Amino acid sequence: SVGQNPNLVGSITDANNIDLNSGGNQEIFSLNQEGVITGIEFKLDPSLRTSEILNNLVMKIYFDEEKTVDISFGDFFASNLQFNDMRSLLLGTKNNKDYLYSYFPMPFRENVKIELKNNNGFVVPLDYKFTYNRNLDVLSCNNFGYFSLEHRGPISLENDGVDYTLIEKTGKGKIAGVILSMKSEGEWPGFIEGDEKVYVDGSLYIHGTGTEDYFNQGWGLSQISFASHGAPFVESYH
């Protein structure tokens, strides 16, 4: 269910805390064998629940020596414009906003390393917990991809009718989700009138009629947060 750690059979928990000094990378988790990370949780003091602080906390994850995650807490947990109470199946906040969680399965064949970097000008205390399995059997498959993130922006869209590419990749893979933060300079959020377009193998696969369509909404955006989709914060507009 939403906000619940899957705790697969054979799961191991590594819980600890750290005072993150300003600047420099600090390793908080590593494993030198095959396995799957199934849960990442960070406990936040109320004083840390601002977009400015979260945007200056960076998480880096290396799978089999390759860095595939390098992103701020604000961008990863959908709080780069303000701290949001988002609750989806695999990502969000829980326990009265005390915890940030990610339950995306993250497999690796040889090793994994997770680092944090604090770009705030002060020490940030964090409690964290990782849940993982020491073998790949829990996946029930041998052919898997690595969990990867790609961050784009910020960018200013000034011309009507110009498409903005969220992601473009070649090869095999699956899109697991999109976090999109948008802000209008005027009262009317005209960006929701942009048609979403999805191209697969060179062909137009989906062509909607508004940005809100992509997030399973219509006739504008409502502030909602569901297991598979939502808009955790929407400024009122008329």
Image (cartoon, rainbow, N blue to C red):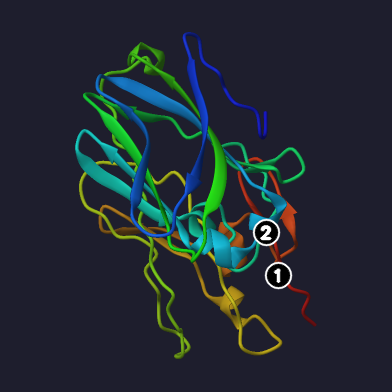
Question: What's the distance in space between the residues labelled 1 and 2, CA to CA?
Answer: 7 Å
Residue 10: percent from left, percent from top: 47, 9
State whether residue 80 appears in this view: no
Determine crowd level at label 2: few under 14, some 14-19, many 20+ residues with C-alpha closer than 10 A: some
Q: Which mark is residue 212?
A: none
- Which of the image's four quarters has the C terminus? bottom right
State whether residue 61 appears in this view: yes
Q: Which residue occupies the foreground of this view, 112 or 18? A: 18
User: Which amino acid type is shown beneath numbered disc 1?
Assistant: Gly
Q: Residue at x 70, y 66 (%)?
A: 221
Determine crowd level at label 1: few under 14, some 14-19, many 20+ residues with C-alpha closer than 10 A: some
Q: Which residue occupies the foreground of this view, 205 or 154? A: 154
Residue 191: percent from left, percent from top: 57, 78
Residue 22: percent from left, percent from top: 43, 59
Residue 23: percent from left, percent from top: 38, 59
Q: Is residue 161 left or right of residue 81?
A: left
Label 1: element kind: loop
Above or below, comparing residue 238 to residue 33 in the picture: below
Judging by the rendered image, the residue that carries numbered circle 1 is 220
User: Which amino acid type is shown beneath numbered disc 2?
Assistant: Gln
Residue 3, picture quadrant: top right
Q: Which residue occupies the foreground of this view, 51 or 197? A: 51
- Which of the image's four quarters has the N terminus? top right
Q: Is residue 178 left or right of residue 109?
A: right
Above or below, comparing residue 164 to residue 86 in the picture: below
Q: Residue at x 55, y 18 (%)?
A: 7
Task: Tell me whether circle 1 and circle 2 mark residues in contact (CB < 8 Å).
Answer: yes
Q: Is residue 169 left or right of residue 69?
A: left
Q: Residue at x 69, y 85 (%)?
A: 188
Judging by the rendered image, the residue that carries numbered circle 2 is 217
Label 2: element kind: loop
